[in-house]
Image (cartoon, helix red, strand yellow):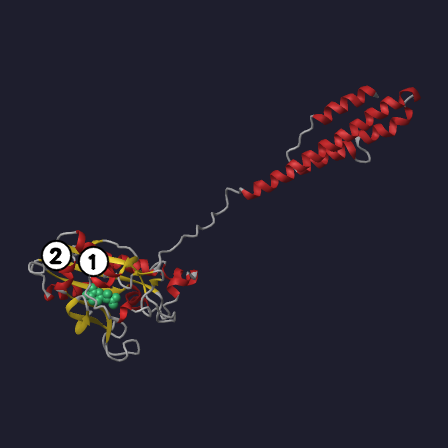
Amino acid sequence: MKTKIQQLLEEVNSLKASTLEEAEALRIKYLSKKGEITNLFNDFRNVPNEEKREVGQLLNELKNNAQEKLNTLKEVLTASGKTEQKTDLTRTAEPLKLGTRHPLSLVKQEIADIFSRIGFTIAEGPEIENDWNVFGALNFPPEHPARDMQDTFFIEKNPDILLRTHTSSVQTHVMSSQKPPIRMIFPGRVYRNEAISYRAHCFFHQVEGLYIDKNVSFADLKQALLYFAKEMFGPDTKIRLRPSYFPFTEPSAEMDISCNLCGGEGCAFCKHTGWVEILGCGMVDPNVLDNCGIDSKFYSGYAFGMGVERITNLKYQVKDLRLFSENDVRFLEEFTNAF
Ligand code: DAH
């Protein structure tokens, strides 16, 4: 009996199973009602009394070992079965969720591409500014309403520090630090103290353009803008320039393009005029050149400024400005294949 127990103990300790079914078959072989270990328990009554104590202990040890061994085998097999499922190499891969570029970035990039094709380079300036860069150098009279708290965000403790209200401020930086010829665009974010609604926001984006050289004329401005309009909105696009006023340009104009929705026929979008306004422009006022250290006796130039949201709305008919800053993925995903 003792040799039999010893032999089974060795057998049990080296048991192996590669499936749950195999493990169950082993349990039946050793521990079921007719199993080998159970049979030994049945034979226990034939063991002579003086050996009962020792043999009983050995039998219990054998049974516990067998149970423990089989439980461990089953646990290991169940766990590895689960991980096998997780790494099923034949499964089709989950599609990767790719981000999309923001519509304003797409349009800003397109504007930059168009102007870079006619020799413009790109620069950026700070969003936190002082009065001189945003207003003073650009010929704003001291009493100009833009300098009012109602339009501009000022830092309370120091009213000389403010958030720029237009990217024209980058003109000041560039002209004060570089010599003509200057042919550049300045994209960036601007801030105005406006109540937020579907058609106004306290921040938005602009692209400013500046060209300074000898003998720059209004005709050069018109050509550059016509080229831009056709590239951006299609070759049939027409432009018209209406006289306007800006402190930093003289003469100044606002530019309309033929409505790209109705082709100039007149629709609700263009308020039945066939035209929509897209930018302000003009010849850089000689005072501005002189304020920035460029001699207006030798140099002249043109400037223009446009709102990126406005151009984006024209291209994609976004009706509510707030959508641009809410980060609603459903809105952003509409532009996945925009370019
Ligand atoms: N800075 C103007 C604005 O924010 C836009 C503008 C108008 C820029 C005329 C210019 C310009 O450079 O010549 O409304």
Please tell me whether mark 1 sits on a helix, a strand or a loop.
helix
- Vertical arrangement, residue 200 with respect to residue 298, above or below: below
Rendered residue at 20%/58% (across/down)? 172
- Residue 50 position in % (x across, y down): 92, 20
Measured as percent of width and height from the top left, residue 296 is found at 9, 60
Quadrant hosting residue 303? bottom left
Q: Earlier in the sequence, mark 2 or mark 1?
A: 1
Which residue in the rendered view is the most extreme toward the right?
49
Kindly state the secondary structure of the residue where label 2 is placed. Answer: loop
Near mark 2 (Cα within 10 A), the count class, few <14, some 14-19 or many ≥20, is: many
Q: CA distance from mark 2 to mark 1?
A: 11 Å
Residue that carries the numbered disc 2 in the rendered image: 294
Going by the numbered disc 2, the residue's amino acid type is Ile
Instruction: Tally the marks.
Output: 2
| Residue position marked by numbered label 1 in the rendering | 172
Closer-to-camera residue (253/89): 253
Q: Is residue 229 visible?
A: no
Q: Nearer the viewer, residue 152 or 27?
A: 152
Q: Residue 219, percent across and down?
A: 10, 66
Looking at this rendering, what residue extends furthest in the bottom direction?
272
Disc 1: residue Cβ within 8 A of ligand 1's nearest atom: no
**Residue 226: x and y, percent?**
16, 66
Neighbour tally class for label 1: few under 14, some 14-19, many 20 plus, Cα within 10 Å:
many
Report whether 203 appears left or right of 171.
right
Quick check: 329 left or right of 252? right
Q: Quadrant of residue 122?
A: bottom left
